[in-house]
Amino acid sequence: MGSLLPLSLFLLLAVDYLEGESARGRRAAGTSAPFWVRLNPEFVAVPPGGSVWLNCSSSCPLPEGSELRSRLRRGKTLSGPGWTSYELLDVRAWSSDVHCFITCKGETRWATARVTAYKRPHSVILEPVILKPPFLVGRKYTLRCLVTHVFPVGFLVVSLRRGGRVIYSESLERFTGLDLANVTLTYSLPSGSRDLWQPVTCHARLNLDGLVVRSSSAPLTLTALAWNTESKALSFTSIAALVGILLAVGAAYLRKYLATRA
């Protein structure tokens, strides 16, 4: 009997140790229970220089810390149970990522949102370029496309279409300015019989990582282009000269007729 007592005591101590380790394991598992973090809106677009509010929320009942990381300038901050709203000011970078970090029971999670600044073109205007000599030189039309108050210019593609077919396209990715800008493109295209009554339009397209913004000009008919001020003046002069000749010939016949009657 005496030899069995130490063995029984050893078994009891081992069971107690294992139960204690199991309880500690359950408590440890509880501290790393999953929780979510959200940053809304996840994608927002504002005009250049504008401001925006982002709301960071989580399912953690007692967060140990909350932090917003962004290169954008911070403004006011509002908070309540489970959420914090941050104001971001003077957004001028065309695209900025914003991160919200929440720490709960020793674990840190985060959510990400993207703030985009862009401005749809105020107008897209297609017009003939009046030159001296006239813009229809060497059987070519010289046209000018004006895209006004657009941002960011570096993501702009301008194209000309004739009868629905792209005849010219140019990407302006070389421009890196952070302000609204006007863009003017001049292009000369050959004229020919197949161009008669073919409308030409200018198209501006912003490609912003999946967001596509399109604007276009009113159509311009090529046959009307050659009828510029100088062409009109020349035509009117020719017509006036012809009328003068007809009047002179008529007056001569009238004098001859009157002379024979006398």
Image: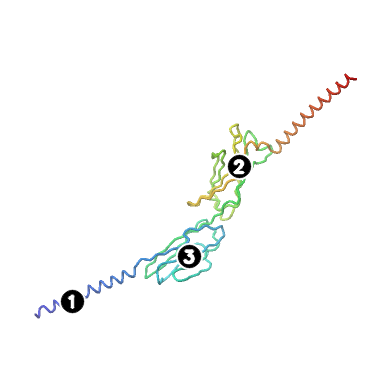
- The residue most toward the bottom is 2
Q: Which mark is residue 219?
A: 2
Q: Nearer the viewer, residue 71 or 111?
A: 111
Residue under label 1, please give it.
Answer: 12
Q: Which mark is residue 55?
A: 3
Q: Nearer the viewer, residue 236 or 153?
A: 236
Q: Nearer the viewer, mark 1 or mark 2?
A: 2
Q: Amino acid at mark 2?
A: Pro
* Image quadrant in which the C terminus is located: top right
Q: Is residue 113 left or right of residue 217?
A: left
Q: Is residue 33 left or right of residue 141?
A: left
Picture residue at 40% right of the left edge, 67% below the top: 59
Q: In the rendering, at what x and y percent does residue 230 appear?
A: 71, 37
**Residue 69 against residue 226 in the figure, above or below:** below
Q: Residues within 10 Å of mark 2 (few under 14, many from 20)?
A: some
**Residue 26 against residue 210 in the figure, above or below:** below
Q: In the rendering, at what x and y percent does residue 130 appear?
A: 67, 41
**Label 2 – label 3 distance at C-alpha:** 45 Å
Looking at marks 1 and 3 on the same chain, the residue that comes earlier in the sequence is marked by: 1
**Residue 10 against residue 211 in the figure, above or below:** below
Secondary structure under badge 3?
A: strand
Q: Residues within 10 Å of mark 3 (few under 14, many from 20)?
A: some
Q: Mark 1 and 3 residues: CB-CB less than 8 Å, in contact?
A: no
